[in-house]
Amino acid sequence: MPNFVPGLKVGAIPITPENEHLLKSGYKARTEKELPVLQRWFPRESIEIPDATMLDLILYSYVELHLYCAAIVV
């Protein structure tokens, strides 16, 4: 659906010959228990991130939301 959130940026940009030299890579893990995996990224300050034109909405059922919310309440 068209983006209705002002200022929302895209989550990924294409790698092109013009920006390839800015690409960084390294092994990263989300937690200490996880094995690091090879990732690639552009440093935020090295590129201009365009606004998103489209949104990909994921809708959950009431039951799924209720189970999720109950699991995070301490």
Image: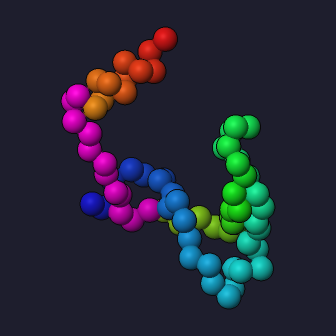
Q: Is residue 68 left or right of residue 32?
A: left
Give yes or no for residue 59 being in the magenta stretch.
Answer: yes
For the question of whether residue 16 can be seen, the reply is yes
Residue visible at 45% across and 21% down in the picture: 72
Q: Is residue 19 above or below residue 40?
A: below
Magenta part of the protein: which range?
52-63
Q: Main secondary structure of the magenta part?
A: loop
Q: Quadrant of residue 53?
A: bottom left
Find residue 70 and report its horizontal and vertical position in percent. Answer: 37, 18
Q: Quadrant of residue 54?
A: bottom left
Q: Is residue 10 left or right of residue 27?
A: left
Find residue 55 and report its horizontal and vertical position in percent. Answer: 35, 58
Find residue 68 and report its horizontal and vertical position in percent. Answer: 37, 27
Q: Which one is in front, 38 or 42?
A: 38
Give yes or no for residue 45 being in the magenta stretch.
Answer: no
For the question of whether residue 45 can be seen, the reply is no
Looking at this view, name the residue that lies furthest to the bottom: 17
Q: Quadrant of the N terminus?
A: bottom left
Residue visible at 70% across and 48% down in the picture: 35
Q: Which one is in front, 49 or 62?
A: 62
Looking at this view, name the residue that lies furthest to the top: 74
